[in-house]
Image: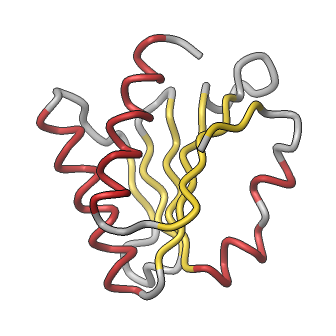
Amino acid sequence: MNKEAMEISSIAKEALLDKKAEDVQILDLTGISNIADCFVIASGNNVNQVKAMANNVEEQLYKKGYKTLHTEGFQSATWILLDYGTVLIHLFNKEEREYYGLERIWGDAKVSE
């Protein structure tokens, strides 16, 4: 994982933990994906928490000079995607996370918690 992706994922993880996100994982996709270098995946207990997690990630990364390239899912907030280019941040409610199983799909990735 490149230095920028490591910094973005580290800041995002701290921002998520600050909002009581659960099961925060960082998947290192270096060498196995051309989509991104890394995924940050976390779960929230309800729509309001998932939105708060996303807002805090955006705020903390913006303070460090990183701007979101694209976002999806704020309307329903069952799966919010924040695109930072080399890092994609996936914020789920628990049911959606289990259903889509990104950790299973990207099972070859190195995982850190």
Residue 99 x/y as whole percent: 78, 77
Residue 77 lies, with reference to residue 40, above or below; the image says below
Q: Which picture quadrant has residue 52?
A: bottom left
- 69 displayed left or right of 78: left
Residue at the (67%, 71%) spot, across then down = 97
Farthest top residue?
A: 3
Residue 58 x/y as whole percent: 25, 50
Q: Nearer the viewer, residue 66 or 45?
A: 45
Residue at the (32%, 74%) spot, across then down = 51
Q: Which picture quadrant has residue 77?
A: bottom left
Residue at the (41%, 45%) spot, across then down = 13
Residue 91 x/y as whole percent: 50, 64
Q: Nearer the viewer, residue 111 or 48?
A: 111
Query: How many numbered marks have been drawn onto this rendered protein structure?
Result: 0
Q: How is the image coloured?
A: secondary structure
Q: Nearer the viewer, residue 74 or 91?
A: 91
Residue 87 lies, with reference to residue 58, above or below; the image says above
- 106 displayed left or right of 2: right
Farthest left residue?
A: 63
- 5 displayed left or right of 70: right
Residue at the (43%, 88%) spot, across then down = 46
Residue 47 lies, with reference to residue 43, above or below; the image says below
Q: Nearer the viewer, residue 97 or 83?
A: 97
Residue 39 x/y as whole percent: 59, 41
Q: Quadrant of the C terminus?
A: top right
Q: Quadrant of the N terminus?
A: top right
